[in-house]
Amino acid sequence: MCGIVGYIGKRDAFPILVEGLSALEYRGYDSAGVALVNNSGLSVFKDKGKVDHLKEITSDIENATGTKIGIAHTRWATHGAPSYANAHPHLDVNKRIALVHNGIIENYSILKEKLKKEGIEFLSETDSEVLAQLVGKYYDGDLSSAVRRALLEVEGTFGVAVIAFDNPGVIIGARRGSPLVVGVGDDEMLLASDASAIVQHTKKVIYLKDNNLIELKHGFFNTTTLDNRKINPEIHSLDWDANALAKDGFEHFMLKEIFEQPDTIRNAMRGRLLVDDGTARLDGLNLVLQELRAINRLIFVACGTSWHAALVGEYLIEELVGIPVEVEYASEFRYRNPIIDAHTLVFVISQSGETADTLAALREASRKGATVLGICNVVGSSIARETHGGVYLHAGPEIGVASTKAFTSQLTILSLLTLLLGRMRRISHSDGVTIARALEAVPKQVKKILKQNERIREIAGIYAKHNNFLYLGRSYNFPVALEGALKLKEISYVHAEGYPAAEMKHGPIALIDKDMPSVVLALKDSVYDKVLSNIQEVNARGGSVIAIANEGDREIEKYARHVIHIPKTLPLLSPLLSVIPLQLLAYHIAALRDCEIDQPRNLAKSVTVE
Ligand code: G6P
């Protein structure tokens, strides 16, 4: 969501902060700003718009150079529209402190009224300014005490960075519910809402925990709890290199990430897929075989694309493991009263590991005494830290807001989990080996599909001006239909609905005409013939069909206007392949409509508010 960067060290802070903002821009991006401490006090540069706009308006500032400390922010509006006044950093009324904030101050209106009665004037509509005013009110030269006092009064979530006009030697950072990572460099310290703003400078990081506060000084740091107990945090080493954040010649991160999938799927399997034994090992689950064997029910909790992956997981586990699975939207799960017993295992699935609803669901499940495991991409993220165990995707940073490679990595992990649990129950050795071999072949098959990129672009060209799409699939490919429709919505702003193919006749069929194309997943599986009938129903109403079908399937060409052929695999693994053309189709339609693919309007990569 919003992004925070802070720098204190021996180099000029300004360019480091602005570059850090560019690296974070994918998280949220309707405004950007920087605050620096120099001899004349605080300098603030901010405006609505992207980081590039901030660069333009600051291209000739002289007082920024030479300054060795500052904080910066990219905003994704929650309270108040994007504007100069609402952009961070915010100052207190006496311009003595500057603050950037991620998260939501829930009791901001009560605090604001109180401060107004004390004569404090507000310049913005944000909840964050309330926090700036509170810190300013308490500041008497000791910044960490002022921040501590202010934070003890607020309810809600925060990741904050604060500097003071008369102290070029300290940045205070603190968090509750909104991530903050500290970079420990040579004689310099960085602070950011995610490691992508830090990795260019240092690989040594500290993941700040909830209710922790850190004082960053020139060359050292001091970490305490909000109630001032000393902590010695662990220093981790980042395992990704700075190149992961470059587009590598691709026009967009999303396209680069789509093309990375042969590698990312392979990385998810590495060391985990045991082909000869027809099973998998997932040591990170931290459960012994007896514990896994005792499980008789699974609950998957997730949001967005991760929720679609969970749905595939339900089909996999119920069919091959034979235990009931529930798939829940995290936002619903957290406020329901879910039934969890001693034999229920809860899995939270999240690329970022920071999605607020998923995190809250995790905590709710833990409170109920469940063992909660994670399937997560970002190492050291809140979800990774708060779960009892789990599996990392190892997909590398995903920058495009629309998730692609994380989805296929999640599917890979869910397939491995199915093998592991299934081999303890109903999957025989030979069936296990068949599945493992098919899984092993997937990266090469994905590569083959990617070779059709140009052809998919041509098909996109035919349909790029249409404003409504239907996506249909059944069985394992129903969740893929949902995911294909979501991809198109997210990045091209075209209305698209995903439906179980057979449900079409209970409503969406009324929408079909020549202006509403249907993308149909028609793979050679147990429901193939039935899906063919659905295609004919679309044709009969003047709609046109783009079918995703298996190589060698000639029959489908009689019914579908366009066919994208994909290699054959086991039906249970087919989502790993069938989603690839849908990602490319969405990408090209969005590109042809001139949309901002990596940073679609109104969306954020990691939704850290409820
Ligand atoms: C946001 C992103 C989606 C993502 C969802 C869940 O809505 O735009 O791409 O699928 O959050 O994110 P998570 O990081 O929990 O998988």
Image (cartoon, rainbow, N blue to C red):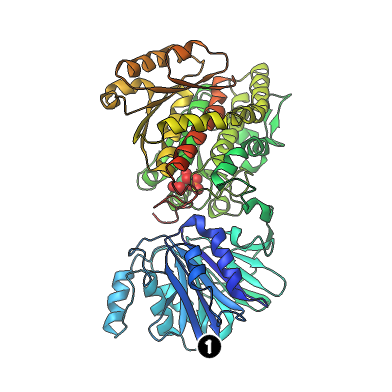
Task: Identify the residue at image location x=62%, y=31%.
Answer: 416
Image quadrant occupied by the C terminus:
bottom left
Whether 485 is drawn above or below 535: the answer is below
- Where is residue 59 drawn, in percent x and y? 53, 73
- Where is residue 436 drawn, in percent x and y? 66, 25
For the residue marked with disc 1, what is the amino acid? Asp
> Pointer 1: what residue?
166
Q: Nearer the viewer, residue 421 or 198?
A: 198
Whether 261 is drawn above or below 567: the answer is below
Can residue 296 be seen in this snapshot?
no
- The response on whether ligand 1 sits within 8 Å of label 1 is no
| Occupied quadrant, residue 65 | bottom right
Mark 1 secondary-structure assignment: loop
Q: Nearer the viewer, residue 52 or 313?
A: 52
Task: Identify the residue at image location x=65%, y=69%.
Answer: 232
Instruction: Give the number of callouts.
Output: 1
| Occupied quadrant, residue 62 | bottom right
The answer to whether 151 appears left or right of 466 in the picture is right
- Classed neighbour count for the residue bearing mark 1: other residues with Cα under 10 Å, few (<14), some (14–19), many (≥20): some
Can residue 355 be seen in this snapshot?
yes
- Where is residue 108 drawn, in percent x and y? 33, 70
